[in-house]
Image: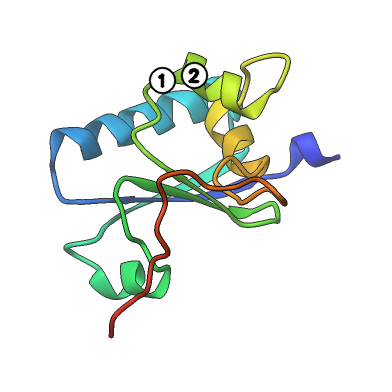
Amino acid sequence: MKSQAKYVLRLYVSGSTSKSALAVENIKRICEQHLKNRYDLEVIDIYQQPNLARDEQIVAVPTLIKRFPPPVRRLIGDLSNQKKSALRTGPRDAGVMACRKVEKGWLTRRKNVPRKNCRPFHAVN
């Protein structure tokens, strides 16, 4: 059953900033509230482990990556606006907001939907 799958999450933060602390606090609260004993959360400081951030192509922090269950999804932000998050994903209930948002492809490109105010990103080595 998909709802019983163990979620593997990585949260990329930038040092001990207030935004990073808020993101850690919010994701832990959301996971404890909606995914009790069904998640592994790894918090990665991009200053301490820059190679992991580069390998994952992290361009903004905080960034949450849902590694499992597939497909892999990304969410950028501190997860503080749960009401707005629930509205963007479209689930009937607001449960598992962060994980659903990532799972439903909140940041993935929908076919035939033009992007507004976006420029292509090109990584520089």
Badge 1 marks a residue whose secondary structure is loop
Q: Residue furthest bottom?
A: 125
Badge 2 amino acid: Lys
Q: Nearer the viewer, residue 53 or 44?
A: 53
Badge 2 marks a residue whose secondary structure is helix
Which residue does the numbered mark 2 point to in the structure image?
Answer: 84
Q: Residue at x 69, y 14 (%)?
A: 93
How far across and down, in percent of the image, does residue 26 sit? Answer: 37, 27
On the rendered image, what quadrant is the C terminus found in?
Answer: bottom left
Badge 1 amino acid: Asn
Crowdedness near tag 2: few (<14), some (14–19) or many (≥20) residues, C-alpha within 10 Å: few
Q: Is residue 124 above or below residue 35?
A: below
Q: Nearer the viewer, residue 16 or 121?
A: 121
Which numbered dot is residue 19?
none
Q: How many marks?
A: 2
Horizontal side, residue 91 vs residue 99: left or right: right
Q: Residue at x 69, y 56 (%)?
A: 71
On the rendered image, what quadrant is the N terminus found in?
Answer: top right
Horizontal side, residue 108 vs residue 74: left or right: right
Q: Residue at x 53, y 20 (%)?
A: 33
Q: Is residue 28 above or below residue 115?
A: above
Horizontal side, residue 20 vs residue 117: left or right: left
How far across and down, in percent of the image, does residue 109 sit? Answer: 62, 51
Does the residue at mark 1 contact the one at mark 2 (Cβ under 8 Å)? yes
How far across and down, in percent of the image, does residue 100 sit? Answer: 63, 34
Q: Residue at x 60, y 30 (%)?
A: 35
Q: Is residue 118 above or below residue 54?
A: above
How far across and down, in percent of the image, does residue 69 sit? Answer: 69, 51
Which residue does the numbered mark 1 point to in the structure image?
Answer: 81
